[in-house]
Structure formats: structure tokens, C-alpha cells
Amino acid sequence: MRRAALSVLWVVGVIALVGSVWSQDAELTSAEQAYRNGNYAHAAELYQTILNRGLASGEIYYNLGNCYYKLGRNGQAILNYERAQRLLGSDPALDVNLRLANLKVPDRIEPLPKFFLWRLLDNIGGLLTANGWAALLIASEWTLLVSLAGLIYIRSPGHRRLLTGLFLIAACALVFTGGFHLLQKSHQNTPQGVVLTEKTEVRSAPEIGSTELFALHEGAKFTILRQVSGWVEVHLADGKQGWMPQAAFEKI
């Protein structure tokens, strides 16, 4: 009896899984068709429905960003492009669209100059996502272990020279990929936000009556330092800092 009940539950689970996948595929097809027909608002609704069910992917965020870009909602477009970039890493089409969307942001936030070595590391790290570097890290670990095992058990001089070279390459790759994995993980875990209101004032303290330091407009991106009762302290790439109402933005 118990085995029969488990079998029934297994069958029900498989049917539910297949139904969920079919439903997602149908919604994706409908969203793509709506986008091709120029019905960008309906396409955005369908993509958002899929995301609300926890089925996030870089491609869906990218498509949603395209819908919002077509609708003229630049803040939402940039927000979803940024989310897509965290999952997809460097992608030519995505990078171009994000750059075009950023050109529409009135605020010209020029990043503070970085030492060329840090810029180089950021550029190399950005070639892959944290998950991409993690996959290379695991491959390096396995190569290191296999070559080490070969050095322990194989006595042929020719094979040992080959394994020694492989071991050294794997060890270097392990350090290299591990470092970039941590770098990208650090960037990914840094809380950032995008302004979604047309304009918001950034103030000297987390209260309405405090001094207005500067204003940010829809689409501006910033780093979140801390949150205090409906306000967040933000830091811009150009070094500016202040407090903004939490209702004015959304986290990436």
C-alpha cells in the first residue's frame, strides 16, 4: 500500500513538473509573439509573470528590459538589463542595449579614475559571471587532482614530465579562476539600485527636511550603503553620497 501511494505521488509530481514546463514554454512563446507584434506591454506582463514564479533567467530579464525600452520606461529597462548582465556576464547585444539606455539618463555620473591594474582585472573578470568562473575553478581543481594522482602512481619519465607541466598549469589556473570567481561574487553581492521615479532628491540625512545635496533621475545607478526606516544611503561612482527615499528605486 505504501509503495503504491509513493508511486502515485511520483506520477503526480512528474505530471505537475511537465505541466509547469509546458506552461512556461507557452507563456514564453506568447510573450515573444506579443513582442514581435509590437504589443510590448502585454509581453512585459507575460515575462514578469514568469519571473514572479521564480523562473528567473538572464534571457528573460533581457527580453523584459527590451519591452520596457520600447515602452519608454527607461528606469525599468536599465534595471532589467543590469539583472540580465549579472546572470549572463558580458554579452554583445545586452551591452549595446544597456549602453543605449544609459545614454537617455540625464545624470552624467563619471566614475572616479582607477589604477590601470584594477581596471584590467575588472575587465577580465567581467568576461564571465561568478558561476562561469566557478565552473572553470572546478575544472581546474579536477585537473589538479588527476595530474597529482598521475604523479603519485605513474613512473614513466616522459609521462611524469607531461603530468608535471599539467599540474603546474592547473595550479596557476586554480589561483587565477578562484581569484576572479571571488571578484565577481563580490561585485554580484554588492547591493545596488536603479532610480525608477522621474526625479528624486538625495539629501544629507534620512529625513525630508534635511539639505538637498543633488538630484538623480530615472535610470541612475548607485551602490546601497545602508538602510534606515524608509531611507537608504547611496554612493555614486563619482564619489557623491547621500540619502534617498526607499520608494524611489528598486534593487538590482
Image (spheres, rainbow, N blue to C red):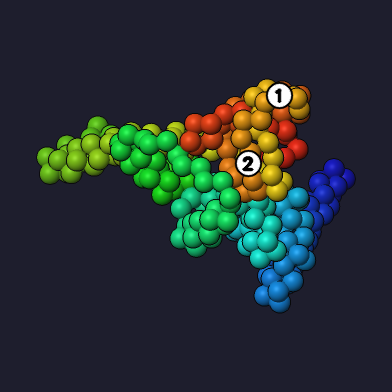
In terms of sequence position, does the residue under pointer 2 or pointer 1 come before the other? 1
Q: Residue at x 57, y 34 (%)?
A: 223
On the rendered image, what quadrant is the N terminus found in? top right
At mark 2, the secondary structure is strand
- What is the tally of numbered marks visible in this picture? 2
Q: Residue at x 66, y 30 (%)?
A: 212
Instruction: From the top left corner, tell me how far across and down residue 134 is, in percent.
Output: 45, 41
Residue 151, image quadrant? top left
At mark 1, the secondary structure is loop
Q: 146 or 144, which lies in front? A: 144
Q: Which residue is mark 2?
A: 216
Residue 26, image quadrant? bottom right
Q: 11 or 241, which lies in front? A: 241
The amino acid pointed to by label 1 is Ser
Instruction: From the top left corner, tell me how far across and down residue 211 is, in percent.
Output: 67, 26
Work out which residue is located at the far right of the displayed protein and give it: 1
* Residue 101 visible in image: yes
Work out which residue is located at the far bottom of the displayed protein and give it: 37
Mark 2 or 1, closer to the camera: 1
Q: CA distance from mark 2 to mark 1?
A: 16 Å
The amino acid pointed to by label 2 is Leu
Q: 35 or 228, which lies in front? A: 228
Q: Which residue is mark 1?
A: 210
Q: Residue at x 64, y 46 (%)?
A: 217
Q: Is residue 89 above or below residue 228?
A: below
Q: Residue at x 46, y 42 (%)?
A: 110
156 left or right, relative to 139: left
